């Protein structure tokens, strides 16, 4: 049972707040904005972190990605205006064979050649990435076949002119037709469409240099690796006005699928040691999604702490505002305090009354702030492409802090009111 005296104290506190509605509302604003900002900022940070981690997870926690990169010396020569030159760098077919036979715990090695070309169907023409790869590409990367089939071992053995396209490219090339069994033209050759795939990560991007930029994965054409090597060769020529650039790159990316996470951690340094023996130039990079995921999780924790700390300052300011208003209220109600003390009210009763008022202000502001804080991320997601995630712990944290602020910042004004001398308080005008 709640003591009757406590109920009376709560009623007196609420009545006092209702007598000054505007002042009470303005006092609550600091708490409302503080709670709202904590929830909203953590939701935005959580959403950004979630998308980054999902993109890394879709690369495969058991995979190790090795990409060809242009050596710094050759890049400087190319940027200095040296035209008509041929650059040779990057991964080779022999590298793939060595990785498969040498590194313990390797399940499969997936080589890839990535060529930037335009793909045509009738009057439609779309820039894309032509990726020469093996039939188990979908198993290693998780690309789901939506219709038809993926490349087969017989396609690779016969160097067939067949291709698989992504769903996005299918919409662009075939807006009104079924892509299956139609032929698309790439460079001087025609390729029959045998399947459509949905990539797991639309955000990931690759180019011939292996960097994460260029055409999105939703604009890709997959052909057998043997067909790619026969049709395009190992030397890629880029013509510009009055000159040309030739690059000899056998493989643009090799994905090494490991047995488990433990094998990934041990294989990373072994792969680098093996490749360094055959690559004098710094013409490759090793990307371990597992390490990136752990870094992203650590970054997320730091990011949330920073955002939460910044937003908590608003709550602190709101608490200072409550204390300031309550101190002013104590001065205004000095005579009332004196009368209550003269009629038998104890110091604890006075303390409890003022503490109830501050807690009501902070809790009320906290509840409103929670509602606004949940709505704001939803509005942000609807108006932008940004993903936001409101977590229960952020709501609980913000609301708990608002309640604690009401108690902490209300204690001093309440104690100041209770410590007033009753006789001096009665004389106060």
Image (cartoon, grey):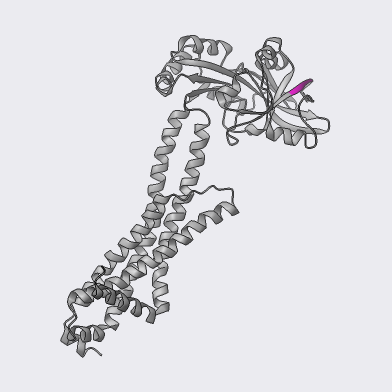
In this view, the residue in front, 185 or 261, is 261
Q: Position of residue 316 (x, y in %)?
A: 34, 62
250 to the left or right of 287:
right
User: Relative to the observer, which residue lies in front, 402 or 204?
Assistant: 402
Residue at the spot x=19%, y=83% of the render? Answer: 341
Residue located 50% across and 13% down the image: 99
Q: Is residue 292 above or below residue 18?
A: above
Q: Position of residue 229 (x, y in %)?
A: 68, 14
* Residue 287 visible in the current orientation: yes
Across and down, in percent, residue 75 comes to 58, 25
Q: Nearer the viewer, residue 349 or 369?
A: 349
Q: Residue 403 in the image: state x and y as whole percent.
A: 33, 62
Specify whether residue 252 is in view.
no
Q: State which quarter of the image contains the N terminus.
A: bottom left
Segment tinted magenta in the rendering: 189-193
Q: Which residue occupies the extreme front position in the image?
A: 1
Above-or-below relation of 114 to 95: below
335 part of magenta stretch: no
Q: Quadrant of residue 130?
A: top right
Query: Measured along the vertical axis of the image, is residue 369 above or below residue 323?
Result: above
Q: Residue at x 29, y 83 (%)?
A: 332
| Chief SS of the magenta region | strand
Q: Is residue 401 above or below residue 133?
A: below
């Amino acid at each position: 049972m709640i003591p009757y005296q406590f109920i009376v104290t709560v009623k007196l506190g609420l009545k006092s707040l209702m007598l000054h509605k505007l002042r009470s509302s303005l006092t609550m604003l600091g708490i409302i904005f503080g709670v709202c900002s904590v929830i909203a900022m953590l939701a935005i940070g959580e959403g950004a972190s979630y998308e980054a981690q999902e993109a890394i997870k879709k690369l495969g926690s058991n995979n190790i990605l090795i990409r060809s990169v242009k050596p710094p010396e050759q890049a400087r020569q190319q940027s200095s205006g040296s035209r008509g030159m041929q650059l040779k760098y990057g991964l080779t077919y022999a590298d793939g064979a060595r990785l498969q036979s040498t590194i313990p715990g390797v399940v499969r090695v997936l080589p890839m050649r990535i060529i930037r070309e335009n793909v045509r169907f009738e009057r439609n023409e779309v820039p894309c990435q032509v990726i020469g790869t093996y039939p188990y590409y979908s198993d290693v990367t998780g690309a789901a076949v939506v219709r038809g089939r993926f490349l087969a071992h017989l396609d690779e053995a016969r160097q067939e002119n067949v291709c698989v396209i992504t769903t996005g490219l299918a919409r662009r090339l075939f807006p009104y037709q079924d892509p299956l069994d139609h032929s698309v033209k790439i460079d001087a050759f025609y390729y029959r469409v045998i399947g459509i795939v949905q990539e797991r990560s639309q955000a990931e991007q690759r180019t011939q240099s292996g960097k994460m930029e260029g055409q999105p994965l939703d604009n890709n054409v997959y052909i057998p690796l043997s067909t790619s090597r026969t049709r395009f060769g190992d030397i890629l020529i880029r013509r510009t006005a009055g000159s040309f650039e030739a690059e000899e790159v056998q493989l643009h990316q090799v994905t090494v699928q490991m047995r488990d996470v433990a094998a990934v951690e041990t294989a990373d340094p072994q792969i680098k040691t093996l490749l360094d023996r055959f690559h004098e130039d710094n013409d490759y990079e090793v990307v371990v999604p597992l390490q990136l995921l752990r870094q992203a999780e650590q970054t997320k924790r730091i990011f949330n702490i920073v955002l939460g700390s910044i937003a908590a300052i608003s709550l602190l300011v709101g608490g200072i505002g409550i204390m300031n208003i309550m101190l002013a209220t104590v001065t205004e109600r000095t005579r009332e305090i004196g009368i209550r003390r003269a009629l038998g009210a104890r110091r604890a009763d006075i303390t409890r009354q003022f503490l109830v008022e501050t807690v009501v202000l902070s809790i009320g502001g906290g509840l409103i702030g929670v509602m606004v804080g949940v709505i704001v991320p939803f509005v942000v997601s609807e108006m932008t492409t940004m993903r936001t995630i409101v977590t229960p712990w952020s709501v609980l944290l913000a609301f708990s802090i608002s309640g604690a602020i009401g108690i902490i910042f209300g204690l001093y004004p309440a104690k100041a009111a209770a410590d007033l001398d009753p006789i001096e308080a009665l004389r106060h005008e």
